[in-house]
Amino acid sequence: MTTATAPAAIPVAPLARESGLRVTQVRVLRSEWVKFRSLRSTLWTMGLSVVLMIGLGAMFSAISVNSAEGMDPGNTAISTSLTGTFFAQLAVGVLGALLITGEYTTGMIRASLAVVPKRLPVLWAKLAVLAAVVFATMLVASLVAFELGQAILSSKDLGTSLSDPVAVRSVFGAALYLSAAAVTAAGIGALLRNTAASITTYVAIFFLIPTLVATIIPRSWAAHFAQYLPSNAGTGLIDGTYGLENPLSPWAGFAAMCAFAAAVVAAAAWRLHHTDA
Amino acid sequence: MIEVHNLSKRYGEKLAVDDVSFTVQPGIVTGFLGPNGAGKSTTMRMIAGLDRPTSGEVIVNGQDYRASKAPMAELGVLLEAKAVHTGRSARNHLLALAYTNGVSADRVDDVIDMVGLHDVAAKRAGGFSLGMGQRLGVASALLGRPRTVVLDEPANGLDPEGVMWMREMLKDLAAQGHTVFVSSHLMSEMAQTATRLVVIGRGRLIADTTVAGFVALAGGHTVIVRTSEPARLSALLAGPDITLTPEGSDALIVDGLTTHQIGTAAGAAGIPLFELANQHTSLEEAFMEMTHDAVEYHATADVAVAS
């Protein structure tokens, strides 16, 4: 066989190197923050969740003021002004799911994981940025919704104020609840890697199943487990019991909701680490 | 340097990559050839740590890439399928990748200028043409000045000027001492860019050789001679290291003699010749020859031309 011209396999010039390169969790966080703020879909869903939180809180407060029977049973002045939480959880859920499935549907995830081949720092950074942004934004929105709602309710002396410790817990609680919901949605997104499937699953867990349990399943059965569903468990923080027979205490309920989120995230982390990108 | 050892990847029933081993050296451009579905992209994804090998291993610059502390300084990849979020601007896309490893924003802007995307850096990547997308992919691969660069079909979608630019850039990188591994189905493009070739078909290694060696491996230079007396001419030309293959009723394919030697011998013996011509196997033909039935050539890797 002919031996062809041997290639020059020796580097002829020293390589120019970038100095100080290294992957750190803080650097990946910074990267995820750039990703988060540079997409219209994130800004749009964040804006929508603020509008829902404040607008629906005001609307339900106005309905209570104008209704002859006053507050619905199981609701208080605090929970009525924070009714928007129930609707904002849809917007933050879509945000959380899209934050991850958007990378899978566009192929971006391959670029992201190629530069951070250990992979898990990317998931932790995404969840941290999501939780921090949702908490900070929704805390402000929750406070505005509370004050606006109380101002409306006060016209018939139904309102309360932040001097009530339950009110403070509820205002923070709404932001905590929405952060946990968004993280759960992101975990579902990382597990399923598909936008439609993830949002459907999220809606099923947070809206459909609680409603079915409350309406179709006999109360004698539902009373044993309805309070453990993540949305029912978490909303205890917001001073509403929403017709549960055996509600968990507010912080125990939130712990149950976080445990559910942690289980979903753990499964997602396992899949991210062990399967092909 | 990339060292691939007994690499296999199975997707369900399909063995996409089957016990492939080769080494990609720094300082030269190494081409990665194979028909569609041969396993090129799968191999490159395993090099980049995106797909986990079913068996075997890949060593990039002496270590497992996934264990690397500064991945962007070790390996830059351009993958065949687009790997860009369509809603993000080119610059933000590159910034997000750069920050993970601590690459500066200044370096991002330099790379944007280098690949010629300055004017569209603020535009959403979703609106990019295939060629612009390739330039963005090259930019992301070069951000960390990686020692090793892996590019899957980088010329795909580029206009002739872009192809020229890509070719020069790959050669420059190699000349600076980088390891450059680039796949293509365009044999002619590889002939002008690559020094060495790794060829696979149906997931198996067919050849790991130089460009010239690959042509020789698949047939090399032969001579066709047409005469009224093929039997007499055969007897006359026969000898050690010479292969004579009858072609039709009046022609011979001769391997091992020049046109000059054949013409002189035939003239001296008085054998009339109707045609005497060199047959150059092009890289394209060599490739077709080697891959049309990849299974038939399993063992060829062992006779790959040593460098």
Image (cartoon, rainbow, N blue to C red):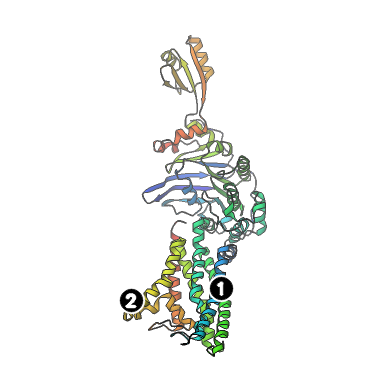
**Residue A51 numbered tag:** 1
Q: Quadrant of residue A19 in the image?
A: bottom right
- Residue contact between numbered discs 2 and 1, judged by CB atoms under 8 Å: no
The picture places residue B197, in percent across and down from the top left corner, at 52, 39
Q: Give the structural element (helix, strand or loop) at label 2.
A: loop
Q: Can residue A199 be seen from the camera position used here?
A: yes
The image shows residue B146 at horizontal and vertical percentages of 59, 52
10 Å neighbourhood of mark 2: few (<14), some, or many (≥20)? few
What is the chain identity of the residue bearing mark 2?
A
Q: Position of residue A117 (x, y in %)?
A: 51, 58
| Residue B121 left/right relative to A232 | right
Residue drawn at x 48%, y 9% as measured from the top left? B270
Q: What amino acid type is highlighted by mark number 1? A: Val
Q: Tell me where residue B203 sits by quadrant.
A: top left
Residue at figure coordinates x 58%, y 42% from the top left:
B28
Where A241 falls versus A46 (above or below)?
below
Q: Is residue A116 above or below residue B293?
A: below
Against A76, residue B100 (above or below) is above
